Image (cartoon, helix red, strand yellow):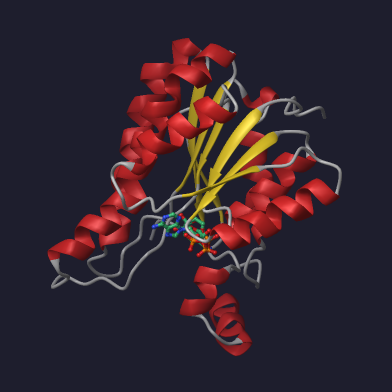
Amino acid sequence: MDLGLSGRCALVTGASAGIGMATSRMLAAEGAQVVLVARRLDLLEELAEEIAAEGHPRPLCLAADLTDPSAAVRLRRQVEERLGLLDILINNAGRAEPAGADLDEALWQSQFELNFHSKRRLAQEFLPLMAAGGQGRVVNLVGILEPVAVSAAQAAVAACILWAKGFSRTVASQKVTVNCVAPGRIDSEQLRTHFPTQEAREEFARKLIPAGRFGTAEEAAALIVFLASGPAGYITGETFTVDGGMHRSI
Ligand SMILES: NC(=O)c1ccc[n+]([C@@H]2O[C@H](COP(=O)([O-])OP(=O)(O)OC[C@H]3O[C@@H](n4cnc5c(N)ncnc54)[C@H](OP(=O)(O)O)[C@@H]3O)[C@@H](O)[C@H]2O)c1
């Protein structure tokens, strides 16, 4: 299938690791001009080198801390100046800090900035460019909504899913689709901080994941890239899980 991504411009947040890195590689392999965003610029530059060495368009690397409310405007200005277009926004950066009911106010704020507000702001900032290109795509990385206790990250993810549903309806007539992808347990830098040993990962998978293993970043990226593609133009306002069958409603 031709994904229609050649010559399209895609910005991926959280491109320095895990799912964002795998998604960036896949988009570039499909011929997209990729903009890599994260705090660790050295890792972005390494990835850009690797992608260019494989003969794909060299990505633009932009350092940003997405807990900073001014980051979205700055990124939009930089992309407008350097490239002049943007078709695809992959709102992937996110992190769940250990968070309980007694969590301090600053951590609640930063968890909402990163896991919700930054995604909403970037989509709003880039909407005119995405609409102008006639094939706009927003994909938000969220999570499965089954908190076992108070979690600032999960509350922010819930906000993101509801915002995305409303936004998808508002922008549909501008040929921009908006979807969410909810990973279950995908092996990544972040997951390895929660499950540091192979033993811990295998035990969790044996008990709770019907597929019997954690997913790979590439398995999540494949869905994200499809949702970003031309043929996915009639899919909008949805949340899709990638979890090896882990989630159930009871
Ligand atoms: N892996 C899973 O099973 C799983 C499950 C549920 C949800 N998710 C969600 O899926 C997304 C990707 O997860 P992952 O597991 O691939 O994560 P990861 O390996 O930890 O990578 C996270 C990425 O986000 C970036 N990031 C973190 N804080 C940032 C900040 N303040 N400003 C800018 N960038 C920031 C990191 O880059 P820098 O450190 O260089 O800034 C990194 O590139 C996240 O939104 C995560 O919450 C993943």
Q: Residue at x 58, y 76 (%)?
A: 205
Residue closer to the observer: 71 or 106: 71
Left or right for 25, reference 11: right
Q: How many marks?
A: 0
Residue 220 horizontal/vertical position (percent): 63, 52
Across and down, in percent, residue 24 comes to 66, 47
* Above or below 125: residue 128: above
Quarter location, residue 18: bottom right
User: With 228 as the anchor, is 13 left or right in this view?
Assistant: left
Residue 66: x and y in percent read: 38, 50
Residue at image coords 73%, 25% = 7
Q: Which residue is at the front of the view, 152 or 5?
A: 5
Query: Could you tell me which residue is drawn at 44 percent across and 31 percent down?
Result: 76
Quadrant (top left/top right/bottom left/bottom right) for the N terminus = top right
**Rendered-image quadrant of the C terminus:** bottom left
Tell me: residue 74, above or below residue 172: below
Q: Is residue 164 above or below residue 181?
A: above
Q: Is residue 185 left or right of residue 9?
A: left
Residue occupying the far front of the picture: 81
In the rendering, at what x and y percent does residue 239 appear?
A: 47, 40
- Residue 114's place in the image compared with 55, above or below, is below
Tell me which corner region of the image, top left, top right, bottom left or bottom right, holds residue 71: top left
Residue under the image location 36 percent in, 55 percent down: 145
Work out whether residue 244 can be spotted.
Answer: no
Can residue 152 be seen here?
Answer: yes
Name the one closer to the observer, 39 or 114. Answer: 39
